[in-house]
Amino acid sequence: MLDSEDKQYISEQIGSQLKQNNKEIIVALGEFLEQNILPRIDNLERTVSTLPTKEYIDKIADNLETKIANLPTKQYLDDKLADAVSDTVNLIDKRFAKRDALDKDFKTTVTEVVEEHDLATPSQLSTLKKSISLNTPLTA
């Protein structure tokens, strides 16, 4: 069996070995931190420092809200589009009316010339005059 001196010696050896192991673990852990963890923390700090501040984000949000508030509504755009379509249709109608008036004047003049020079029979003249009054195209 072990006497007390042996036990004391074993205890001191184990304690010494534990202290040595602890020192080695601490050194290894320190090296690991220096090589792996600290560079990542530094990189994270640099990244975080480049992120926009809350004040900047709030300013951007306010600007967006202002711009959104100034956008036209769907109803406004619908009304403007309806007005533009109506104006276009009215313009087309006026141009067609002007063209139709010129066309009617031309047909009337041609009919009068044909009638004055007896270039058509009375039934043909009647068809021409009827076509002009109804504003329909002439057929052969």
Image (spheres, rainbow, N blue to C red):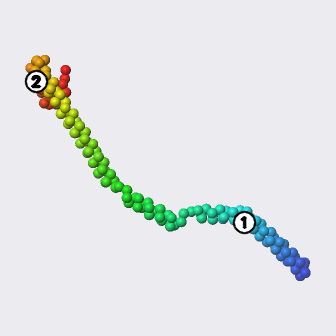
Q: Nearer the viewer, residue 114 or 50?
A: 114
Residue behind mark 1: 33
The part of the image, by quadrant, that contains residue 87 is top left
In the displayed structure, 7 sits above or below 24; it is below
C-alpha span from label 2 to label 1 = 110 Å
For the C terminus, which image quadrant? top left
Residue type marked 1: Leu
The part of the image, by quadrant, that contains residue 124 is top left
In the displayed structure, 30 sits above or below 70; it is below
Residue lying farthest to the bottom in this orientation:
4
User: Residue, x 37% and y 56% (percent of image)?
Assistant: 71
Q: Mark 2 or mark 1: name the one nearer the start of the chain.
A: 1
User: Residue, x 31% and y 54% (percent of image)?
Assistant: 76
The 10 Å Cα crowd at callout 1, few under 14, some 14 to 19, many 20 or more, is few
User: Residue, x 73% and y 65% (percent of image)?
Assistant: 34
The 10 Å Cα crowd at callout 2, few under 14, some 14 to 19, many 20 or more, is few
**Can see residue 61?**
yes
For the N terminus, which image quadrant? bottom right
Residue behind mark 2: 126
Q: Secondary structure at mark 1?
A: helix
